[in-house]
Amino acid sequence: MVEWDADPRPPTRRPTPTANDPTSVPPAFARLRVWEREGERAPHKPLLVLLALGRWVSGEQGPLRYSDVEDPLRNLLTEFGPPRRSHHPEFPFWYLKNDGVWVVSPEAGYPPRKGHSSPSARQLREAHAAGQFTPTVRLAFEKNPALISTIARQLLDAHFPATTHEDILAAVGLDTDSPFPAKVGRDRAFREAVLVAYGYACAVCGAGVRLPENTKLAPKPEAIKDWDKLSADEKKLFTRQMEVFAGFGEHTDHEVGRLVGAIEEMGQLDNTLFVYILGDNGASAEGGMVGLFNEMNYFNQVPEELEDILKKIDQLGGRNAYNHYAAGWAVAGDTPFTWTKQIASSFGGTRNGTIVHWPKGIKAKNEVRSQFHHVTDITPTVLEACGLPEPKEVNGFKQRPIEGVSMMYTFDDARAKDRHTTQYFEIFCNRAIHHDGWVAGTVHTHGQRVLVLQL
């Protein structure tokens, strides 16, 4: 039986790049020979090259000992390779030399192994084996560092789904927009300095991001522990969960930015009604008290233990996880309200900020609107902005009247009187009604309570 990770073909060497032609270097990496099975391509050699490129730009331009890259490469294979019970980083480390871009020292002197043409991981470690790019490749990188970005992008496009590219670059410490290492982490002092500089207010609309000192928050659910009462393991796991969520937020922001940039390149951004709703509901508490590695366990009523998730903490946010943070983060994310998603009778479960951008249609700039509106008001807003009537019939089918009102009346009048005056909410019997600035609601999930408050 042939190992997926192995290179079972004869160790004939591929055409090598020439010293006097740097343009031959990228094609040499494009010709990497990888093992394929049933439409899957082994990513082992590409991941080793990307890891070595990351080490190169970080200053490690000499030989890389196998013992130093064994665990990082195994982690990359676990994160971005096909699911396997075990991974073998020794195979790409050894067989990459057959592609004419990599050399291993020592190349000979390893005890023969039955059924294998390569040394074992233990033999590589004991021989202090080291690998590095060939002299020609190293010289090309020294003369033209931009080749590193070209090759990295080339490998990503050829061997990995686009959705994993940024994760892989971050994992190996590369940035394809620059031949220098990607920055990892953020300076908390810098963040605080930015907040101080802007007076703890949004730089766009001026809305405050810090609650007044005497603000009385809604009570926290009793089941949610305070941070200082968590165990060390809980803090470790919960910190990682929020780091993953922050990465998701950053990714979303980046992708929305790409959409905005594309519309701008078309010359249509100023005349595009752009409505950005910051979520589809309140933050979700479906992760339970410790979170989930696989959210489907929640729907199948399969509990997960803290210890089990900790064993896979490095996989959170990756392709092998369908993770969900602990309920405490949902409560924190829904501040200043008490409840979360599924509790439709609380604004913590339903309220989301919304950004509307349309320079050619809105005279006001960088302002806040506080009128009450619901997601059903988006379509009427778009129809009014386009000057279109509400459709009464579509393809011969009569349509129910749209249960919403346009928000356009608020665009240039911050003090306009609310037009969406009544709204009903309900999920799993947790129901509420809003009318003329008042809200009445019940929370059946946690014992019946009747809440009446004025907005």
Image (spheres, rainbow, N blue to C red):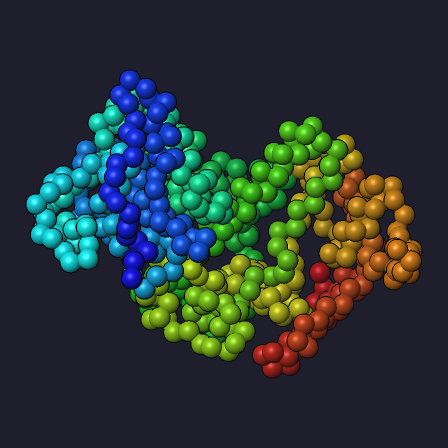
125 horizontally vs 333: left or right = left
Residue 233 is situated, as x and y percent measured from the top left of the image, at 32, 66
Residue 253 is situated, as x and y percent measured from the top left of the image, at 55, 44
226 horizontally vs 365: left or right = left
The quarter of the rendered structure image containing the N terminus is: bottom left
Q: Quadrant of residue 190?
A: top left
Q: Residue at x 44, y 56 (%)?
A: 38
Above-or-below relation of 7 to 345: above
Above-or-below relation of 207 to 269: below
Q: Residue at x 26, y 36 (%)?
A: 13
Residue 162 is situated, as x and y percent measured from the top left of the image, at 49, 44
Q: Can residue 230 be seen in this snapshot?
A: no
Residue 362 is situated, as x and y percent measured from the top left of the image, at 76, 36
Tally the marks: 0
Task: Judge by depth and name the residue closer to the eye, 62 or 408.
Answer: 62
Q: Quadrant of residue 450?
A: bottom right
Q: Residue at x 62, y 39 (%)?
A: 259
Extreme residue in the bottom direction: 447
Above-or-below relation of 373 to 338: above
Q: Residue at x 25, y 45 (%)?
A: 10
Task: Judge by depth and name the residue closer to the eye, 22 or 344.
Answer: 22
Task: Judge by depth and name the residue closer to the eye, 378 or 209.
Answer: 378
136 horizontally vs 22: left or right = left
Q: Quadrant of residue 442?
A: bottom right
Extreme residue in the top direction: 20
The quarter of the rendered structure image containing the C terminus is: bottom right
